[in-house]
């Protein structure tokens, strides 16, 4: 496992190649800061793009779904998949329409998935799906029973190859436009943040937020909370 | 154009059908609150999932890209596409792993795209791409020149069919778990918000944020800002 993904016709960043990255560290960081991805797959020749929660363990990505879902049954055949994560970081205005842009961090991962069949492995993975978001929570709650484990399919995809594409620049205009176009121009940061928790209306008395969720505070950036939770759970 | 999209094997929501919606109003509202979508398409039998900005005009969706991009050249062939928008609205904890969830609003749109060839139509569309985010801005900035218009491809997809899937519930546990599992359990709202604008370092003196961007204020929800901008521009 070298430090970078192989660059192939599938994952090579063609447009604005200066924004392309192939090192595992960059791709992993984008994945581990996200809860949701979008997966492209093909059924009967038609592409579908489905959002789902996912997580990474080493060079494998995992997600789950109902064992009866059309997506899961199709993906279980080992078809080609493309799993994409996108973080929107800023709206970037400009003095020409052409140079308006956004800052973003995106990762595209290619591979095929298989169904995790082993019941004990499935149970351990479903626990880590919870702990990956809420560190240590799987030990505080009711574990999945056999019926729940059977009703859930866990998909495992080895990363075949991947790339990241990142824009993290400020306003960038054609030189003449800086003087010729008297338009107020700015960059607006965009973040995804947590609000104040709304406790379950049927909360038992005397319970408090676990210490392991200390950074789940109103205004916290979700990407930072998820990255921190990821590191606590996977080290 | 009736009030709902046709329900076909392609767009029917099979899992948790109570979360499915087919009325145009619901699908449009999810689309118009978003800047980015993910588009699934197939090249040489392989699916790709690419994030891009987009907007809606009536029953058509538009996006743009470099005329040289592989995605644009493939989509220009009129291949099947699936364009998905997902808003993450909350992390929803539970007293069992099985019932952990998220609140979300997602829309999946199916169709084929064509390239907009007419130069005047392209220019008008590129102006509306800007105004859709920043109302009225296209009249304040330098318009695209012929070279920029040629370098940009604008794609137009008529919505063939679509569906929305929405979860907007609080914590929902198995009845026995409310009493048997003494775990603190809550819903965390998640929002995507604007930060304070960072003016262009080469800003000309004496310029101020246009009145049409009055709701671009720190802490404003991006989905609300985009919905408001959309209505100002398209009525």
Image (cartoon, coloured by chain):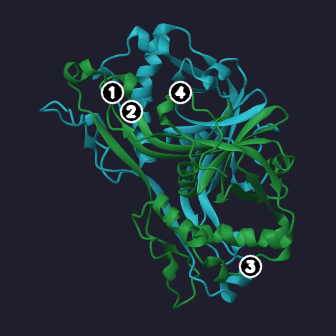
Chain colours: A cyan, B green
Whole-number angstrom distance, CA of label 4 to CA of label 2: 33 Å
Residue beneath disc 3: B143
Answer whether labels 1 and 2 touch (C-beta < 8 Å). Answer: yes
Q: Quadrant of the C terminus of chain B?
A: bottom right
Whole-number angstrom distance, CA of label 1 to CA of label 4: 29 Å
Whole-number angstrom distance, CA of label 1 to CA of label 2: 9 Å
Q: Is residue A228 visible?
A: yes
**Disc 4 versus disc 2: nearer the observer:** 4
**Disc 2 versus disc 3: nearer the observer:** 3
| Percent position of residue B4, x then y | 60, 46
Whole-number angstrom distance, CA of label 3 to CA of label 1: 54 Å
Whole-number angstrom distance, CA of label 3 to CA of label 4: 46 Å
- Residue at point 50%, 67% (across, down): B228
- Does label 1 or label 2 sit earlier along the sequence? 1
Residue A136: image tag:
1
Q: Are marks 1 and 2 on the same chain?
A: yes
Q: Disc 1: which chain?
A: A
Q: Disc 3: which chain?
A: B
Whole-number angstrom distance, CA of label 2 to CA of label 3: 50 Å
Name the element at disc 2: helix
Query: A21 above or below B219?
Result: above
Residue beneath disc 4: B15
**Disc 1 versus disc 2: nearer the observer:** 1
Q: Disc 4: which chain?
A: B
| Residue found at the far bottom of this picture | B206
Residue beneath disc 2: A232
Name the element at disc 4: loop
| Percent position of residue B216, x then y | 46, 71
Q: Disc 2: which chain?
A: A
**Disc 1 versus disc 4: nearer the observer:** 4
Residue A83: image tag:
none
Name the element at disc 3: loop
């Amino acid at each position: 496992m070298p430090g970078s993904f192989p660059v192939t016709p599938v994952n090579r960043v063609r447009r604005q190649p200066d924004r392309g990255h192939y090192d595992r560290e960059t791709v992993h960081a984008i994945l581990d800061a996200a809860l949701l991805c979008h997966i492209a797959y093909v059924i009967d020749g038609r592409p579908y793009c489905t959002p789902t929660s996912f997580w990474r363990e080493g060079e494998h990505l995992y997600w789950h779904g109902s064992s009866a879902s059309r997506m899961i049954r199709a993906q279980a055949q080992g078809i080609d998949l493309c799993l994409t994560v996108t973080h929107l970081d800023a709206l970037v205005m400009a003095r020409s329409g052409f140079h308006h842009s956004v800052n973003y961090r995106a990762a595209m991962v290619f591979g095929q998935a298989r169904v995790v069949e082993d019941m004990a492995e499935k149970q351990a993975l479903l626990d880590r799906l919870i702990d990956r978001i809420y560190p240590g929570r799987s030990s505080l709650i009711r574990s999945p029973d056999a019926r729940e484990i059977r009703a859930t399919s866990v998909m495992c995809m080895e990363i075949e190859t991947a790339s990241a594409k990142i824009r993290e620049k400020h306003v960038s205009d054609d030189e003449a436009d800086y003087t010729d176009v008297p338009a107020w121009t700015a960059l607006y940061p965009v973040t995804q943040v947590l609000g104040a928790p709304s406790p379950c209306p049927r909360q038992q008395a005397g319970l408090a937020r676990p210490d392991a969720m200390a950074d789940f505070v109103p205004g916290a950036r979700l990407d930072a909370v998820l990255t921190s939770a990821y590191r606590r759970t996977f080290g």
